[in-house]
Image (cartoon, rainbow, N blue to C red):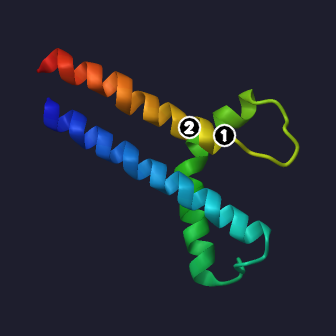
């Protein structure tokens, strides 16, 4: 069971990196640093959008309009850190 919790923690950490990559890519696209007509950029952007949007969309619906600022990735990252530090740690203690 501890191996499964460790694997789950690793997957959550990997998802945090994916969220950060999606946020950075969206900034680069917004400031015209990268061109979305480039096939590689378009493919990476589409992949990151499909991976992160199912998690971010419900949070965006609950959040009030903050203008052009999207803090939903920050909220998801904080939730993941909470799950890793509190929930998974307590589950590990329960099975240890």
Q: Residue at x 61, y 44 (%)?
A: 73
84 up-or-down from 54: above or below? above
Quarter placement of the C terminus = top left
Q: Residue at x 70, y 79 (%)?
A: 34
Quarter placement of the N terminus = top left
32 up-or-down from 20: above or below? below
The residues tagged by marks 2 and 1 sit, at their Cα atoms, a distance apart of 6 Å
49 up-or-down from 53: above or below? below
**Circle 1 Cα neighbour tier, 10 Å, few/some/many (<14 / 14–19 / ≥20):** some
83 up-or-down from 24: above or below? above
| Dots 2, 1 in contact, CB < 8 A | yes
Q: Which residue is mark 1?
A: 72
Tell me: 75 left or right of 14: right
**For residue 76, which numbered disc appears in the image?**
2
* Quarter assignment of residue 26: bottom right
Q: Where is residue 78 shown, x and y percent of the image?
A: 53, 35
């Amino acid at each position: 069971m501890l191996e499964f919790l460790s694997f789950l923690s690793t997957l959550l950490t990997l998802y945090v990196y994916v969220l950060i990559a999606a946020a950075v890519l969206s900034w680069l696209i917004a400031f015209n640093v990268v061109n979305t007509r480039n096939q590689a950029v378009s493919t990476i952007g589409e992949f990151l959008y499909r991976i992160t949007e199912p998690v971010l969309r419900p949070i965006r619906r609950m959040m009030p309009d903050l203008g052009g600022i999207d803090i939903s990735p920050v909220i998801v990252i904080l939730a993941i850190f909470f799950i890793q530090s509190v929930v998974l740690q307590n589950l590990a203690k329960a099975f240890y």
